[in-house]
Amino acid sequence: MFYREAGQFKASYAEDSRIFTIRQDRVGFWLLMLIFGVAVPLLANQYWLKAILIPVLIFSLAALGLNILTGYAGQLSLGSAAFMAVGAFAAYNFMLRIEGMPFLLALVLAGLTAAAVGILFGLPSLRIKGFYLAVATLAAQFFIVWVLVKFPWFSNHSSSGVVTAQDVNILGYTFDTPQAKYILTFLIVAGMALLAKNMVRSSTGRAWMAVRDMDVAAQVIGFRLMRTKLLAFAVSSFYCGVAGALYAYTYIGTVEPEGFNLDLSFKILFMIIIGGVGSIMGSFLGAAFIVLLPIFLDNVVPAIFGDTLGAGFVSNFQLIVFGGLIIFFLIVEPHGLARLWQIGKEKLRLWPFPH
Amino acid sequence: MKLKHSVLLGAAVAGLLGSATASAEEQFVGLPSYRVGPYAAGGSGLFGGWIDYMQLINERDGGVNGVKLSWEECETEYNNARGVECYERLKKKGSAGNTVFQPVSTGITYSVLEKVAQDKIPMVTIGYGRTDAADGRVFPWVFPMITTYWSQASAIVNFVGMKEGGMDKLKGKKIGLLYHDSAYGKESHAILDKLAAKHGFEVIKIAVAHPGNEQQSQWLQIRQAKPDYVILWGWGVMNPTAIKAAAKTGFPRDKLIGVWWSGAEEDTIPAGPAAKGFVAAGFNVAGANYPVVADIKKFVYGKDKGNMEDKTRIGSVYYNRGVVHGIITVEAIRKAQEKYGKGKALTGEQVRWGFENLNLDDARLKALGATGFLPSLKISCADHEGPGKVKFQQWDGSQWKVITDWVDSDRPLIRGMIEESAAAYAKEKGIKPRDCSKES
């Protein structure tokens, strides 16, 4: 009823192969883009931009990176935070050591550095699979953080190992207000999401999915396993690296290696599990869920119970509720929020008739 | 605990509960607390003591010159991103905005270091944070007060010298450094290397990987190197593990010296009898028999408005550290009111002046009932650190006993390092240091 697509015909190949084949989706998509790209920076206050929307966008990008690797290519990874660290520190060092380095170029180079490191740690994936590969990527997680702490060169000999991101300056314009930083982050994330969407719809993405579903069969029908898997590692790390650089430059402003610990890697993994493994939209939904829910609970729970129960209890209670909700969503829809949205769409299409 | 003053709820709920929060002038203090996660034991004690002290000011004195203190907690889980969220959430609360931000986490300190200058909110980091921010000319908005990690390392070396009977006796000695392998643990390296060169002792640096519940190989190394003293620069589970391992290796506990994040009841009690004799530095002391703590018991817990659920922790190291945070916050507000008007709620910018001109001399500490509780303190435009002194306490098996007076650090050496590091930061960031002769 609401989502009726009757009368919409695909008359050309171009129409058939577009991302949103249904008009309602297209309208909805552009509306969302207008809301988040124009209305939000105009209307939202500093708190929303700096503390909520920018981190959600950045973590969406990191989740997207992991989703490419885990969701599309089927390679489980626990090293996403470490690749973010590579991106953040690479961007810092490119900006620091090369005079007049343009920020966007530094961002790309940071992504490429992360991609190179990703390929290196992706090599074991040619031999090992599943949980064993997860353990190998776990090594990446600890090794990279250790290297960044161990060699002070990476943090420019800062005594505490913490580096401060330089100003973001593109073509003479300094991105120092929350609005400017938000728009920059938004454009980069939106652009890279579009790129990812097209990548997974193309032969590259199909190769990944073939490998994910059964790598022996994929090999038999002619996909080169090594190339496919390493490409997935490279692209995934590139996304994580750019997310890490944005984390440093448009969000926190300072980074330390310990900030990119295993907890963060797990968090990114939870984002794609909650959002939907193998779904671009799921990355965004999952990141929003994992970032926003604890903040929401921290606002709501003390307001309800704060005056009657102890502060320690209130803090622990939030974690209990958070964990409970994750389990609830996984039971209700094991395929994540993205699948929930898909089911909702199907229902809306048929409404009010059940069949 | 019973009455967490929450601005979120607003006056309506406060009125409903019959609490007296709804006064005209209120000074808001945002508390980025952590009561869950690996640091929860420290966080709950520290923030409990801090809140209790502010509650004491409200209950006993009716606020600071009639201005009631109000506060709100925001759970950071000791996570940088959550800390930034809390900072942004708290900064506009209250009638005049957040007065002061004290993250009690080095990571969060770095994350908001530049934001506080833009938002004009002073940041006070007592015993953690960025050491070179003690140069107030480069960091006008940051106050690493009382003492820094560098001062602490130097004070520990001075303490060892005292025990040996003179700094010249340190020549040829070996001092082991068992440190948490993180930015926090490495903060000790540069200063100890300089002091070793100066006094002619040798530093043996031994890293312990996070979380530090496995230290067999490290203590084997210590047994082989036979250091005269070992400095324990750890946190959390690493501390009791090290103390127990020292006992197992036969290393004398009175030569194992903890830093202030290694010397609380939470570190010694889990180690059991092995901890007897263990020495630790602290910029505050343990004990509930100080008049200020007694007043909290009388005026706050007497009215059942205390924040601590476990009342036996009142007077513990972390609790008292929270009281120190409270004292410094309240005294800075009081100082700022002298300049900007008594009985008025002040902005963060005005309170910053109060921190910069804070002077807690012995007479003031006595009036506060905190003689010997924290060192006397004088902050200036150039020096945002203050005394840089610590006391040493020894665990006697059931409680901490103070064994020294305030031990000084090598001030000229540390000040030189601070200025050098701050100047490098100023150059990198293009900051022009303030001229302190022009500040009033």
Image (cartoon, coloured by chain):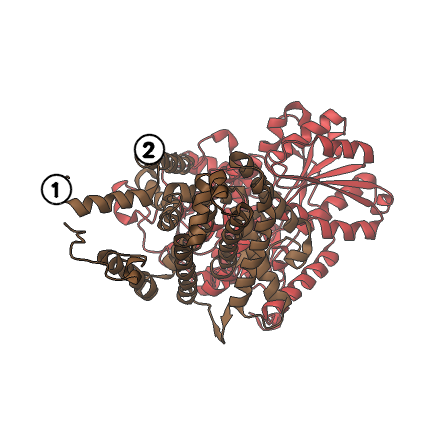
Chain colours: A brown, B red
In three-dimensional space, the C-alpha distance between marks 2 and 1, rounded to whole angstroms, equals 27 Å
Q: Nearer the viewer, residue B300 or B201?
A: B201
Which residue in the protein does label 1 denote? Answer: A353
Residue B298: image location, x then y, percent? 45, 35
**Do circles 2 and 1 both sit on a common chain?**
yes
Left or right: B91, with B160 as reference point = left
Which of the two discs, 2 and 1, sits closer to the camera? Answer: 1
Q: Mark 2 lies on which chain?
A: A
Q: Nearer the viewer, residue A261 or B369?
A: A261
Which one is earlier in the sequence, the residue at label 2 or at label 1?
Answer: 2
- Badge number at residue A331: 2
Residue B204: image location, x then y, percent? 78, 42
Q: Tag 1: Cα neighbours inside 10 Å, few (<14), some, or many (≥20)?
A: few
Q: Is mark 2 on a helix, strand or loop?
A: helix
Res B300 seen here: yes
- The residue type indicated by label 1 comes to Phe
- Quadrant in the rendering for residue B215: top right
